[in-house]
Amino acid sequence: MQFNVKNNRPDTIKTATWVVAIGKHGKLTDTAELVDKLTLGAIKNAIKLGDIKGELGQTLLLQTQQKIKADRILLVGCGDKALSDAQYRKWLSSSFNILKQLGGVDALFVIDDIEVANRDVYGKTKLLVETFEANNYLFDEYKSSKAEAYRLAKVTISCNKILTKQIAEAVKEAQAIALGMALTKDLANTPANICNPIYMARQAEALAKLDKKIKVEVLDEKKMKALKMGAFLAVAQGSEQNPRLIVLQYNGAKKKSEQPIVLIGKGITFDSGGISLKTGAGMDEMKYDMCGAATVLGIFKTLIELQLPINVVGILACAENMPSGHATRPGDIVRTMSGQTVEILNTDAEGRLVLCDMLTYAERFKPSAVIDLATLTGACIVALGTKASGLMGNDQTLVDALLVAGKKADDRAWQLPLFDEYQEQLESPFADMANIGGPKAGTITAGCFLARFAKSYSWAHLDIAGTAWVSGGKEKGATGRPIPLLAEYLLSNVKKI
């Protein structure tokens, strides 16, 4: 979708539809007052007749007269107070849902038309662009009959001349984030019979061809065996699909020696649970168990678009977890790349097994910070639902930075503790540790497990099991989270330079 920024008076801008916010109890914004005056009281008359009450998301379409260059006015209720981020997104989505049904190909917004709590025009613009791009997303790659594209193709944002540069920058960043989210969603929505570890490797190689700053390396089973990645390989051994360790390096910093930020993505392209087989209901959604790896590729797409002057390493741990005569059994013991041994009590707790070897592998990059992303535990959905990602780490400064980034991006995370007392649940009589800690505090004990492999650097873990995709029915699909959070975090690191 195309977004233009103009500092002309909004009533002089030619557009198919001008979207105007209307408050409750007849409260008009400055823009609504202007439109009402130009339309000889049409808005106040509609309010008087009860055609619109200003409730959040309520809409009314008005035809215009010659004094306004817009073909029509779309009134959208915004309530009676400053909107929260969620309410603003609802207001934007209500606008989009009407606009996509109209005949016009473009629309006009006045960025100061609506008040959003704790958001300046920069923040409001980013949310506008990201929300419209998210609503505009379609995935019909495998449908015989393709969906008809929405006519709405261009949005003009009207603003004060002083704010033009700031808003244009917000549009640029938001569109780069939206492109990263779209790639993440495309990969995650692709079925597992197509999107397997080798497919993910090819996608990474294709991405690397877009920018000379990116180098890619793909490690096969033989190379992983040489590195003694026993935990990773144990997960993959039950499948006919060969695993792949994919390493992307984005070298954008002026100093080549600058320590990189390392992003590790869990890439289980299908998770049956292995011998500890999952129930059949909803198992189709286990193609989304690679959303961590898809997110890493998505954030590299955003890096390419923004050309950020930092160094970032992406590590994708891609494998399938399947039951077979070759599969790992409950009770098996494996040796990790770090040399520590793990008793596998549940083969469906496989994500931490691939990640632990990746955390050890990350040491070679001498990282400034390591962040792993994983659809790791159902317990995280029980604890936090689908609104916030779980966050843990060994460096409070890093954790705080991610929490702030999530709040700024409206892609929130919530910190969970990593108290030493939880480590006791991972004790095993036969190995250095077990891969599960029992039914209590499942998300936390998974974090405690990973923490044992991340002692030599600043590390944070994002459990995105509840936020990476929407479950069930026609609404099922990947969300593209936590791309906004990570992009904001990377941008905040650039601003420190």
Image: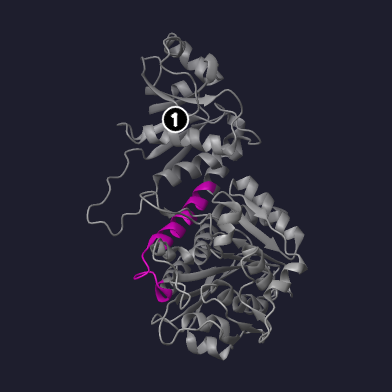
Q: Name the secondary structure under disc 1.
A: strand
Q: Quadrant of residue 100?
A: top left
Q: Which residue is mark 1?
A: 108
Q: Residue at x 53, y 47 (%)?
A: 174
Magenta-highlighted residues: 174-199
**Residue 35's spot in the image, x, y percent?**
47, 16
**Front-lying residue, 100 or 305:** 100
Q: Residue at x 44, y 54 (%)?
A: 471
Colour scheme employed for the rendering of this structure: one colour
Name the amino acid type tagged 1: Leu
* Residue 215 drawn above or below residue 86: below
**Dominant SS in magenta:** helix
Decide whether residue 334 is among the magenta residues. Answer: no
Viewer can see residue 229: no
**Residue 429's spot in the image, x, y percent?**
68, 84
Left or right? Give the position of 283 relative to 457. Answer: left
Q: How many marks?
A: 1
Q: Quadrant of residue 18?
A: top left
**Front-lying residue, 302 or 61:** 61
Decide whether residue 195 is among the magenta residues. Answer: yes
**Residue 313's spot in the image, x, y percent?**
59, 70
**Front-lying residue, 348 or 90:** 348
Q: Residue at x 49, y 84 (%)?
A: 328
Q: Mark 1: few, some, or many residues within 10 Å (few <14, many ≥20)?
A: many
Q: Quadrant of the C terminus?
A: bottom right
**Residue 398's spot in the image, x, y percent?**
72, 60
